[in-house]
Amino acid sequence: MGRFRRFLTTAVLTTLLVGGTAGWASASSGSAPSGPLPGTASWLADDSLGRELPDPATATPAQVAAFFAGLSHAQQDRLVEDHPTVVGNLDGVPVHLRYEANAPAGDRVLAYDPRGRGTIARVAGDLESAAHVSVIVPGSDIDAETFDRTAQRAADLQAAAGDDTAVIAWAGYTTPSGIGLDLATGRLAEAGAERLVRLTEGLDAAGLPDPALFCHSYGSVVCGLAADDTDASDIVVMGSPGMRAADVGALGTDAHVWAAKSPHDWIGRVPNVEFLGLGHGADPTSPGFGATVLPADDVPAHDEYFAPGTSTLTAFAAIADGALS
């Protein structure tokens, strides 16, 4: 009976409380964008170079990078002009070409897919020459329309870390929206983890430094599921409902894992259990988990870990620029 009661508590509380900035009205997140990138059919039919273009669905970022490295500048520019939606979203394409392809969507946009609620990634700092790279992985209710919140966090982290650090604000997966079972399950996190892994593979193919991942709320579930397939140097979780792992060893990563949770964060009321697919497991700030716990007493709320002047932003900046390891 006790086990069943715990299950019910987990189901109800996790559904109500998990997430980044979940609204108090029931909503459906919808499905993650699926199928080929917009413009793929035209891209695959293009034989103007006398050879096949890499299939966006099957080519690895390393293969994409090798293909573009073999093109002349004129050929690269023509592909940007003729196929911007593919070039702008294809991991492994040189950064400056992705910026050019996504120019209508904004400055330094690394990816943009308008389907559904939309996904987007934007860079703060100079990614191509950065000595250090970080990626912010947001929690629920973040999409193309609400992306400015994540972009501002990236700007604050980049400013605190310094000029040799670039920060990618990555709303590259369909996040849970409103209140519903998506908050309490790993369905969307699993899809997000695949996309996050591919992003990091693309950074590697571009010759960029191994990234530090900063994962907020439900984003920490994404990072937990992606951990063993990324080459991240650091994984930092904050306001986390769990990473779907019992401890750091179960993540299967060589990255340094850090965790922060404010005593003023309502995430502390979420039960850290996983039962029949509901809930996200152990609290990463708990002693048995094995993460390095960061001070967060001065963080006033769940959404304020990147706020200027907080101890967490100071620590995040030191991790991002390699000063804290």
Image (cartoon, rainbow, N blue to C red):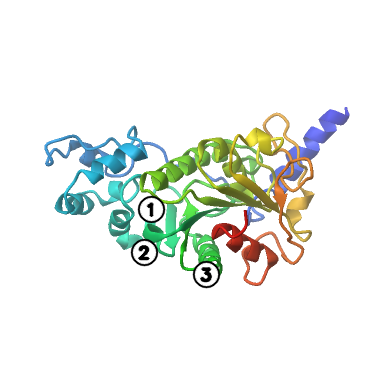
Tag 3's secondary structure? helix
Q: x, y percentage for residue 261?
A: 73, 55
Identity, as a three-letter code, of the amino acid under mark 3: Ala
Mark 2 or mark 1: which comes first in sequence? 2
**As rendered, which of 314 and 104 lies closer to the eye?**
314
Identity, as a three-letter code, of the amino acid under mark 2: Gly
Residue at image mark 2: 106
Q: x, y percentage for residue 196?
A: 48, 43
Residue at image mark 3: 159
Relative to 36, 270 lies left or right? right
**As rendered, which of 270 and 64 lies closer to the eye?**
64
Identity, as a three-letter code, of the amino acid under mark 1: Tyr
Mark 1 or mark 3: which comes first in sequence? 1
Q: Nearer the viewer, mark 2 or mark 3?
A: 3
Q: x, y percentage for residue 310?
A: 68, 68
Residue 33, numbered label: none
x 58%, y 40%: residue? 254
Dot 1 crowding, Cα within 10 Å, few <14, some 14–19, many 20+: many
Q: Quadrant of the N terminus?
A: top right
Mark 1 vs mark 3, CA separation in Å: 24 Å
Dot 3 crowding, Cα within 10 Å, few <14, some 14–19, many 20+: some
x 74%, y 44%: residue? 283
Tag 2's secondary structure? loop
Residue at image mark 1: 112
Q: Using the rendered image of the protein, determine whether residue 238 is visible from the camera's viewpoint.
A: yes
Tag 1's secondary structure? strand
Residue 201, picture quadrant: top left
